[in-house]
Amino acid sequence: MAESFLAWGYRIYGLSTQSSTYQQELVARLQLTFPMLSDEHLAPQPQTPLPTARSPRAPAPCGASPGE
């Protein structure tokens, strides 16, 4: 599917709060055709209201209280 977007001139990126090391492993393991960007500290969130979701097994983001 990413190839279809590329053909239309769009670029695809994944964004996650895991580390860059984890993202590199994820791209290789899943053979993703697009790069993953790491935002471990939720840096763009105040400027860009991106939706966030968290797995029940994932650790809380930096600075967040458990249950947030």
Image (cartoon, grey):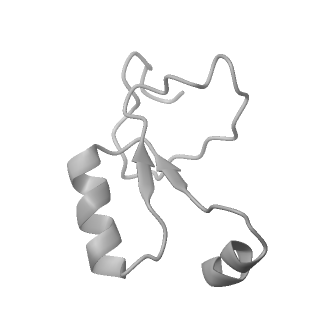
Task: Say whether residue 54 is left or right of residue 24.
Answer: right
| Apparent side of residue 29 relative to residue 36 in the rendered image (left or right) | left
**Residue 56 or 21: which is nearer the viewer?**
21
**Residue 26 falls in image quadrant:** bottom left
Question: At 40% from the left edge and 25% from the top edge, which residue is drawn?
Answer: 41
Horizontal arrangement in the rendering, residue 26 relative to residue 43 (left or right): left
Q: Which residue occupies 67% across, 74% down?
A: 6
**Residue 10's image quarter?**
bottom right
Residue 14 in the figure: left or right of residue 49 = left
In the rendered image, the quadrant that contains the C terminus is top right
Q: Quadrant of the N terminus?
A: bottom right
Query: Front-most of 57 and 47?
Result: 47
Residue 49 coordinates in the image, percent (x, y): 73, 29
In the rendering, at what x and y percent does residue 63 appear?
Answer: 39, 15
Horizontal and vertical percent for residue 51?
69, 41
The location of residue 62, given as percent across then percent down, is 36, 22
**Vertical order, 61 against 28 (above or below):** above
Residue plotted at (61% across, 25% down): 45
Q: Does 2 sit above or below residue 12?
A: below
Identity of the residue drawn at 20% across and 51% down: 21
